[in-house]
Amino acid sequence: MKNKLKIITTFHRSISMSLMVLTLFLMSSCDPSLSGLEYDLPETNSKADENPPEANFLISVTKNYLAYTFANSSTSSTDYIWDYGDGNTSTGVDGSNTFPGEGTYVVTLTATDKLGVSSTKSVEVIVVMPPVSDKLLPIIQEPGFDLGDANGAPDGDSRLAWTAPSTMDKIGTNNPLIAITSTNLSEPWAAKIDVDSDRFGYQELSEMSPNTDYVLTFWYRFNDKTADQTDGSLRVSMIKPITLYSELATNTVASITINGSADNEKTWTKGTLEFNSGTTTTLVIFFDNEVEEIALDNFDLAIK
């Protein structure tokens, strides 16, 4: 009987010890202060263990050979540091930089996620001035009408550079000469075509490269309009050389018509005409108006 009691007592003690151990384990599991059981929760949308950051980017050069753009194509990252290798840095998603001159620059992108895990990519960018184009760029004579007319500047006459063949009249009056005005974009003069005028500008440009894209720019404004007039228009065209006004439509290579409005009334506005020279090496800048008085200044031609 004594042995049976001893066995039962021992059994109860074993159960008590087991319960104590289990209780301590459960208490320790619920106690976040125990450093051994601590762990970090990842930030929203960040899976550092599964998808660490990978830095990557694409490089593009602009028309200005010193200016580059960098399109960020990194993955699993949220913060970025750009180092352009010339002392300039930025922290935007995409990068851009104008380098100080020719040379080799190491551009580095560091991409980081919210857990602080980073990835770095470096690429050498070789900045070189492009070769001078072998395309021909003719010079526009009197592009800003700076000589004025014979009265305003006795030593010269801008109108002569913009005069059409004598056989080319617009409405039968044989008076195609443009006028000159002191209402200008840049001093001292600009071209002018009066209200409902038969005048027009015509300048032949030779030595153009065939099958080449060019860009013609100019500045214009619509001047005083009476209350009973409708809005007028300005036409600027690139045409093949002609001797009669009636040949204009069939020899036009490219043209832009600009209508007068409140936006350009008495306000200088920049106009642009892009064209391809085609098979010819000689083209003509032509401009005229309808109804409203217009002024023109600062013509410029560039290879696209």
Image (cartoon, grey):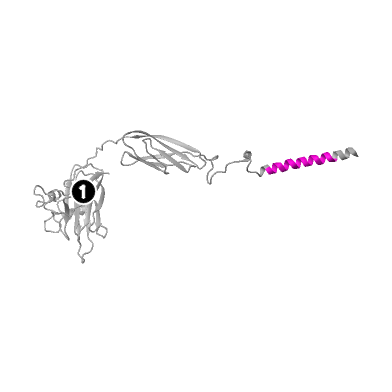
Q: Residue furthest front?
A: 33
- The residue at the point 85 percent across, 38 percent down is 7
Residue 234 image offset from top left, x and y in percent: 22, 56
| Residue 23 shown in magenta | yes
Task: Indicate left or right for 217 with 160 as reference.
Answer: right
Q: Nearer the viewer, residue 167 or 265?
A: 265
Q: Quadrant of residue 211?
A: top left
SS at mark 1 in the image: strand
Q: Quadrant of residue 62?
A: top left
Q: Check the picture and name the quadrant holding the N terminus.
A: top right
User: On the rendered structure, is 300 left or right of 165?
Assistant: right
Where residue 24 appears, as percent x and y from the top left, is 71, 42
Q: Residue at x 42, y 35 (%)?
A: 122
- Look at the image and give the residue range highlighted in magenta: 8-27
All told, the count of numbered labels is 1
Q: Report which quarter residue 101 is drawn in.
A: top left
Viewer-nearest residue: 283 or 69: 69
Find the residue positioned furthest to the bottom.
228
| Residue 32 belongs to magenta span | no
Tag 1 residue? 299
Amino acid at dot 1: Phe
Which sits in the foreground, 303 or 246? 303
